[in-house]
Image (spheres, grey):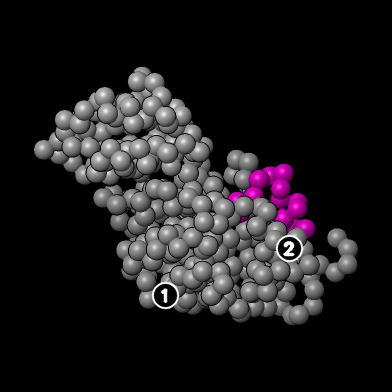
Amino acid sequence: MSWTEISISVSREATPQAEEALELLGALAITFQDDEDNPVLEPDPGATPLWPTVHVRGLFKEGVEKQPVLAALSDVPGADRPENIRWRKVGEQDWERAWMSRFAPMKFGQRLWIVPGGMSIQHDPANIEIQLDPGLAFGTGTHPTTALCLEWLDGTDVTALTVVDYGCGSGILGIAAALKGAARVICVDTDPQALEATTANAARNGVADRVSCQLPAAADCNGVDIVMANILAAPLIDLAPLFTGFLKPGGQLALSGILEEQAEDVRSAYWPGIGAMSVEQKEEWILLAGQAPESSESPGGTSR
């Protein structure tokens, strides 16, 4: 049996219109893929994370007629010319996973690996393998901010600790912490779909009993050992009092999603509660890490 794949490249803003048009045409499945190797950044609350330019692909039964498709897509910006619409016959295969053949296992630090489904790495008892497929959920290891967080986590002892993954996306950081031996992991996100993805990924990796998924309003994160947040600079600044308040004395904080030119503003926001923070950089992205004081005394003092 075979199918017809119809694909178009559109802007992020035109993606909902393209998706609706393909659905009305009777698409059996629709997937999205980065059209220009751009990273997926943390979306605003309630938004769907997408790339600036999106490759939208619809799967149809073989024999779909071209004229109705061209007519339906004529109003979609970027798909309003026939040469911008690509047709391809797809044979008997797992279509939704076929595009993943270009991905490979990725190593972070000394022990952490992200391994897409159907792939494997050479067995080593020291390795920690996170089974996770690349996709729309933010945080699959391919972006420098996620890599920075995983490398930091690889070098951090989380055994028997309580860890918060705030803005969890796919749950990659929280699941990695659980696989490294964290006793309890709290994954928080504003998007219910992200929490569903994290729940599924935690079960897939055998750590569902130690990973709980919560919306911010319901999250009980007080007195934790570690807070990790891979979101953007503006919300990191706004959430500084909340994050520092979560930590027990001596607790650790790791923040990423910060551009180089934003690092000083983020560091200033956390100075009263954390004090000095270390800096790691990958490309133009920064990770800031610090530790809450062992006592209630402010670490920052009145001057810097």
Q: Relative to 8, say whether 252 is above or below.
A: below
Query: Which of the labelled discs sits on residue 270, or is there none?
Result: 2
Q: Relative to 211, say whether 21 is above or below.
A: above
Coordinates of residue 151 in the picture (x, y in percent): 53, 55
- Dot 1: few (<14), some (14–19), or many (≥20) neighbours within 10 Å? some
The N terminus - image quarter? top left
Query: Which of the labelled discs sits on residue 210, or is there none?
Result: 1
Q: Residue at x 42, y 48 (%)?
A: 136
Q: Relative to 254, say whether 19 is above or below.
A: above
The local secondary structure at tag 1 comes to helix
Coordinates of residue 225 in the picture (x, y in percent): 58, 74
Mark 2 residue type: Tyr
Q: Is residue 166 left or right of residue 23?
A: right
Q: Residue at x 68, y 54 (%)?
A: 234
Q: Nearer the viewer, residue 263 or 91?
A: 91
Coordinates of residue 204 in the picture (x, y in percent): 32, 63
Mark 1 residue type: Arg
Stretch in magenta: 256-268
Q: Residue at x 57, y 53 (%)?
A: 44
Q: Is residue 234 visible?
A: yes
Whether the magenta-drawn stretch holds residue 220 is answered as no
How far apart in space, not on screen, are marks 1 and 2 (Cα)?
29 Å
Q: In this view, does 300 lie to the left or right of 215?
A: right
Q: Nearer the viewer, residue 230 or 197?
A: 197
Coordinates of residue 120 in the picture (x, y in percent): 29, 51
